[in-house]
Image (cartoon, rainbow, N blue to C red):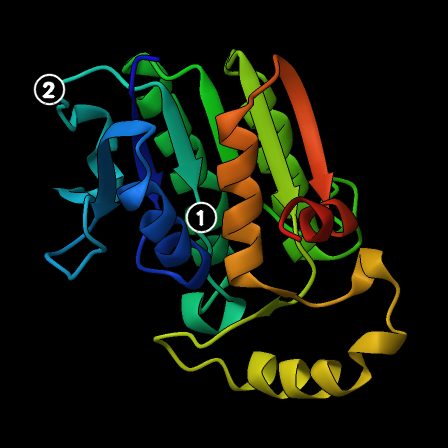
Amino acid sequence: MEKKQAAVAGATGLTGNYLCQLLGKSEAYAKVWALVRRATDLPGGVSPLLVDWEQIEALPLDAPLNEAFCCLGTTMKKAGSKEAFRRVDYDYVLAFARWAHTHGCRRFFVVTAMGANKHSVFFYNRVKGAVEEALAQIGFESLYLFRPSLLLGQRRESRPVEQISARLSVFFRPLIPLPYRPVEAERVAWAMYRCAQNPQKGKFIIENDQILKFSS
């Protein structure tokens, strides 16, 4: 089987880093690029591709892509405003997808969020739902939308509210139904990786309970 070439956005984040570890050591991939804003340590087998997210359309690539994985995301606190949040979680995600498609990518895998709905009363979920809808219009052969619940794991950056929620949720985890149960970022990465090894044509929404099953 011919080896694949893939690109990852959000490689320095919690889920993206785990995903890069899987892709970098996989025999299924000849080349894996991680789009990063500055030089940084990456897992073995993953090559950095420095990107200016405001001008990603001009980013060259010396070989065609088969797949692209998007783990981009921020928080309202870190972004500082709704506009800045949307810039990352909508504009940059969409820009990455379009760039990947331009370079031959036909299969796109992206982390959004549980409850993603462009009509939601919650701004966060509205943005996630809107980007899902926009991605579906690009024309990928396969589009996988992963909707995890609260992500568990040790982040490089401090997110106090998430950390407190995570500690509480771990205690009550056995009582929480699967669709809402907190999930380790590593398991989300595993679910993305496994779906990529046997992709089907079409659009697929992978809810939290399915993520847990895929990664079990």
The residue at 70%/53% (across/down) is 212
Amino acid type, mark 2: Asp
Residue 34 image label: none
Instruction: Report which quarter residue 70 is drawn in.
Output: top left
How packed mark 2 is, by other alpha carbons closer than 10 Å (few <14, some 14-19, many 20 or more), is few
Whether 119 is drawn above or below 95: the answer is below
The residue at 39%/53% (across/down) is 16
User: Could you tell me which secondary element the residue under label 2 belongs to?
Assistant: loop
Residue 27: x %, y % from top left? 30, 33
Amino acid type, mark 1: Cys
Number of numbered labels in the structure image: 2
As rendered, which of 48 and 121 lies closer to the eye? 48
The reply, left or right, for residue 183 in relation to residue 110 is: right
| Res 112 visible | yes
Residue 121: x %, y % from top left? 80, 54
Q: Which residue is mark 2?
A: 62
Residue 71 image label: 1
Instruction: Report which quarter residue 181 is drawn in.
Output: bottom right
Residue 67: x %, y % from top left? 39, 24
Residue 37: x %, y % from top left? 19, 52
Q: CA distance from mark 2 to mark 1?
A: 23 Å
